[in-house]
Amino acid sequence: MYAEKLSQFENAENLAGKAWEHAVACDVISQTLIKDCSMHCFHYQQLFELLFKHLLETQTKYGAYPHTHKLNRLMAQLIDDTDFKTSLDTYEPHLTAVTVCAEAYRYNFLIDCAAYRKDVLALDPLLNELIEFANR
């Protein structure tokens, strides 16, 4: 599902291509019997991070992006520095939750998978908005 959404970036040799690779990983993980959802969360976070950074690199005046992994900060910068407009208030808590979840994966902590899945459902529309913005 995610690889198809980001198919325009398939094997691109840039940040968007890396986002597509993480989308492929999300799709593969979704089709396995892995009980712990933190690996999916790590790749989902990376998908968003790299897509945000790609858009900041290609849509801003100086082509610069911060070195942060915090999705809410990347989205705030995208809104501030480009003509991308959406509700930061709507997505910020979910972006923060996915960022924290990905950090939990790095340190081998278990996460609340039911809550994570709710965050994914809330963020999937944002992913569609970002892809639409990339196509302008």
Image (cartoon, rainbow, N blue to C red):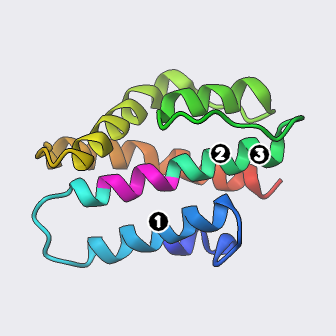
Alpha carbon distance from label 3 to label 2: 6 Å
Q: What separation in Å lies between label 1 and label 2 (alpha carbons)?
A: 14 Å
Front residue of 26/127: it is 26
Label disc, if present, on residue 22 of the rendered structure: 1
Asked which quadrant contains residue 79, the reply is top right
Taking 101 as reference, is 16 left or right?
Answer: right
> What's under tag 2, amino acid-wise?
Lys
Mark 1 or mark 2: name the one nearer the start of the chain: 1
The majority secondary structure of the magenta stretch comes to helix
Residue at 65% x, 61% y is 16
From the viewer's side, name the closer residue of 1 and 19. 19
> What is the magenta range?
41-47
How far from the left and from the top, in percent, is residue 98? 35, 40
- Between residues 103 and 116, which one lies in front from this camera angle? 103
The answer to whether residue 16 is above or below residue 109 is below
Residue type at mark 3 is Glu
x and y, in percent, of residue 35 in the image:
10, 64
The residue at which mark 3 appears reads as 57
Return the x and y of residue 53 as percentages of the image width and height: 65, 45
